[in-house]
Amino acid sequence: MRKARRAAAKRGRRLRIMFADEARFGRMNRPRPCWAPIGIRPEVASQLIREYVYLYGAVSPKDGTCVYLVMPAPDTECFQIFLDTLAKKYSKELILLVADGAGNHHGDELEIPTNIILQLLPPYSPELNPQENLWDEIREKIFKNYALKSMSEVNAKLDEAALYIKRNPTLVKSITSFPYIAKSL
């Protein structure tokens, strides 16, 4: 963190700390608990159709801003597009991007933009990445108990989810401001 702050000061830029991850969303749903009056069993549609897309996301816990991009796969090429999008959106800032150590987050083919410093989390530690909590929020509020008929419906739901998160920075800050993050900002 200190190195990133020194690098930002040296380049005359503001440092933005963001956490990135990707999650799979699709037509295969998992029924979740829901409310129903006493004595009535709720009916929830379920289906086993294996069609997916991936939502790439980055969150800044300090101000609750987010960047989301729907991509077809969790590979290096899609992560590169996401990095380029993120670098362009915050072109005047230096971004310390914290991500898990997935194979597509590092490698010889990946070209890290000049205004991004990539920091990988330790293996098997998703609890350190606040973006994981936003995936839970999206699944609970937007994708709960839906059996979607097509991939265009999945994409529409993902657009709805991205707007829901982007329009609620106070909620995002409350979900993502882990104590270890808040102390370092």
Image: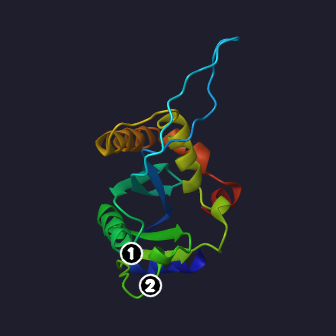
The residues tagged by marks 1 and 2 sit, at their Cα atoms, a distance apart of: 8 Å
Q: Residue at x 60, y 35 (%)?
A: 32
- In-front residue for pair 157/16: 157
| SS at circle 2 | loop
Q: N-terminal of the two: label 1 or label 2?
A: 1
Q: Residue at x 38, y 81 (%)?
A: 110
Cβ atoms under marks 1 and 2 closer than 8 Å = yes
Q: Could you classify mark 2 by the number of other residues whose Cα lies within 10 Å: few (under 14), some (14-19), or many (20 or more)?
A: few
Quadrant (top left, top right, bottom left, bottom right) of the N terminus: bottom right
- In-front residue for pair 116/78: 78
Q: Residue at x 56, y 70 (%)?
A: 100
Rendered image quadrant of residue 35 = top right
Residue located farthest toward the front when viewing the structure as drawn: 48
Going by the numbered disc 2, the residue's amino acid type is Gly
Left or right, 86 with reference to 168: left
Quadrant (top left, top right, bottom left, bottom right) of the C terminus: bottom right
Q: Looking at the picture, how far across and down is residue 22, in whole percent?
A: 47, 60
Residue 40 versus residue 81 in the image, above or below: above
Q: Say which mark, if any, is on residue 105.
A: none
Q: Say which mark, if any, is on residue 107.
A: 2
- In-front residue for pair 147/181: 147
Left or right, 10 with reference to 153: right
Q: Looking at the picture, how far across and down is residue 154, in whole percent?
A: 36, 43
Q: Looking at the picture, how far across and down is residue 97, in whole percent?
A: 49, 69
| Residue underneath mark 1 | 76
Q: Looking at the picture, how far across and down is residue 69, in whole percent?
A: 35, 56
Q: Residue at x 44, y 81 (%)?
A: 10
Left or right, 64 with reference to 34: left
Left or right, 115 with reference to 8: left
